[in-house]
Amino acid sequence: MKSISVPAPLTRNPWAFPLVALAVLVILPLAGYQGGFLRQLILIAIYTLLVSGLNLMLGYAGEVVLGQVAILALGGYVAGILAKHEVHDLAIAMVIAIAASAILGLVTGLPGLRLSHLALGLITFFLVLLVAPIALAFEGETGGYTGIYGLINPTFLGIPIKGNVALYLLCVLTAAAWLVIFRNLVMSRFGLALRVLKENPVLASSLGLSVLRLRLTAYVLGSLPAGVAGCLFAYASVYVAPSSFTLSMSIAILAASVVGGSQSVYGAPIGAALLVLGPLNAGAFDRYSLIVYGFFLVLVGTVLAGGLAGVARTGLRRLAKLLAVGIEGDARPAQAAGPAASGQAAAPDLAIPGESLRVTGASRAFGEVKALGGVDFRAEPGRITALIGANGAGKTTLLNAVSGAITLDTGTVEIGGKDVSGLSAARRAREGIGRTFQTPMIPSAMSVLEVAASGCLIEGRLGAPSAMLRLPRYRRTARGDREIAMAALDVVALGGHAGESAASLPLSTRRLLEVVRAVAGRPKVILLDEPAAGMDDDAIAELRDLLQRLKDAGATVVLIEHNISFVLGVADDVYVMELGRLLANGTPEEIRSDPRVIASYLGSRHGTHQEPAATALEGSA
Ligand SMILES: Nc1ncnc2c1ncn2[C@@H]1O[C@H](COP(=O)(O)OP(=O)(O)OP(=O)(O)O)[C@@H](O)[C@H]1O
């Protein structure tokens, strides 16, 4: 096929397009574009700040909030009141607005997030309604209903901002600077953590993330650009008054976030542009504005889940694929999924030094059901300890009690001699408990590499400040996470699939990927809940190999499994549970010949793949 020449910087450098766009925007006034058009661009830049803050809260953290407009008002009044006191420097106003927005974010976010998603939504809704009453209550400073007028000719760090062009450049450069910070943030561990959280808080906790702290941080960080936007909005409008900050504007910002693409950095300028220039500009039919916003919210919610930015992203990916075919002459041949690819790459050396796990007198009831009735359990480093028993025996409950997903009524859990019984699931994960789930929890919009790298979140430090500014520490962390994730993927020959969508992998590969994620966290104890369920023979062979490697690496592995031939073949120690109690424990040989186990479980059981238990036992011997 004829090769196509595409400028490499444009296809490979993620900054190429934004830099070209910024250069065009900066040049526009020089090219004679001024007046009304420039004013519209000023508004787009200001709304970009506002919408991107909401994107962080809504698109990345999954919180529906309506209070951006109240924070816009806060920033506006900071600039207005400072101007009344003859302080016209926007840099000073912005710093104060950022601090005030952070405080308002904390004060409203903490109770809201502690209560529920709905509570936060309601609190932020009322915040917008409070703008006018508060402005009236402090009429002396705010000018009441009339507001503060005559906000013109500010400075920025002492540089005069005279006229529309200077204000335009300040707004565009401020929005661009924030978008860079925003992009850095969402591409970092912090962004990855938010995406895990949005997908599933239980998974987030199991990866060591404090759900409340993460939500609150996203909410507060998302408030900051709104405060800055308020300062610019006040000078762009020449006044600040309660009439500018309405509920209808809140809904418009929400619509802009969703229609532009709330889970995208570029969704914010797209949404802001729609708000000022496009169909979301409901000013023309003011009385029907809420209907217009509602219509677009429903339309995009049902038809374009990723908003317009999502559509653009998909289109660009397809285009890049087409170009890649053209350039290379042919698409790269697809590699087989993990299990089938076994042996393709030399598996790297692993070192996962484990600690002993000790559970003593574990009891837990769910209403009338006694799921655990005083269970003692031990698992040691460099050994695979299996937990078997009929459905409902209490295996997963015991695993959940170890990981902290549930609390015990009585009993203790110790890791390496340290009692972790009183710790939350997130704290226990940070203490070194890694786990997989009976139903694999693989976030829907992540690549295989991102899922593996999310295991590194267990380390605890998200490093948002260093990520926002791309400090050397952030780069070291990002490089380290990538190397650890790739090494963990290579253990099951999944490295060649690093860039693929994780959710599209077959079930057995997703199960292996869950183990990889746990391994990437280098946990002291690895809990595996039915990892072989639904796997074919090739995948089971791959899993057996992986478990053997974890054991050789010194890991403490706890394995719940119904596939008896597999489990008795791979385990060093076996615990058998029945109706919440321990029936027996010992080596696989001892368990195989234990009359109590044969009578209550093995003798009557049909092993995985539906083979009779007797056959399963023979197979494992
Ligand atoms: N959250 C819960 N609420 C109420 N009952 C529960 C809860 N979790 C577990 N149980 C009950 O506790 C008992 C033990 O369940 P558990 O899931 O631990 O069994 P299991 O041995 O893991 O079973 P399986 O092999 O089917 O996964 C069952 O009777 C189950 O119905």
Image: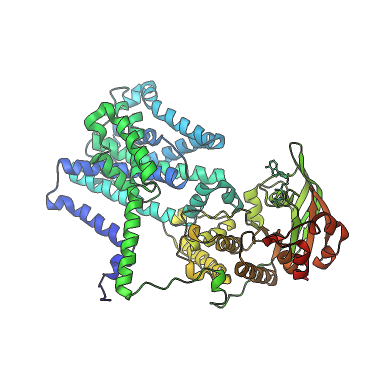
Location of residue 543 with respect to 462 vertically, above or below? below
User: Residue 490 placed where, x, y %?
Assistant: 55, 71
Front residue of 215 and 279: 279
Left or right of 345, for residue 578: right
Image quadrant assignment for residue 132: top left
Query: Is 378 or 366 nearer to us in this picture?
Result: 366
Q: Is residue 235 left or right of residue 73?
A: left
Please indicate, yes or no, whether residue 314 appears anywhere in the rendered image: yes
Q: 507 left or right of 253?
A: right
Can you name the residue that lies furthest to the left here? 32
Q: Nearer the viewer, residue 145 or 596?
A: 596
Q: Position of residue 548 (x, y in %)?
A: 68, 71
Q: Residue at x 35, y 22 (%)?
A: 139
The N terminus is located in which quarter? bottom left
- Left or right: residue 533 compared with residue 575: left
- Residue 357 x, y percent position in the rendering: 75, 58
So how many labels did they put on this image? Answer: 0
Residue at 67% x, 62% y is 609
Quadrant position of the C terminus in the picture: bottom right
Q: Nearer the viewer, residue 400 or 603?
A: 603
What residue sits 25% from the left and 28% below the top? Answer: 286
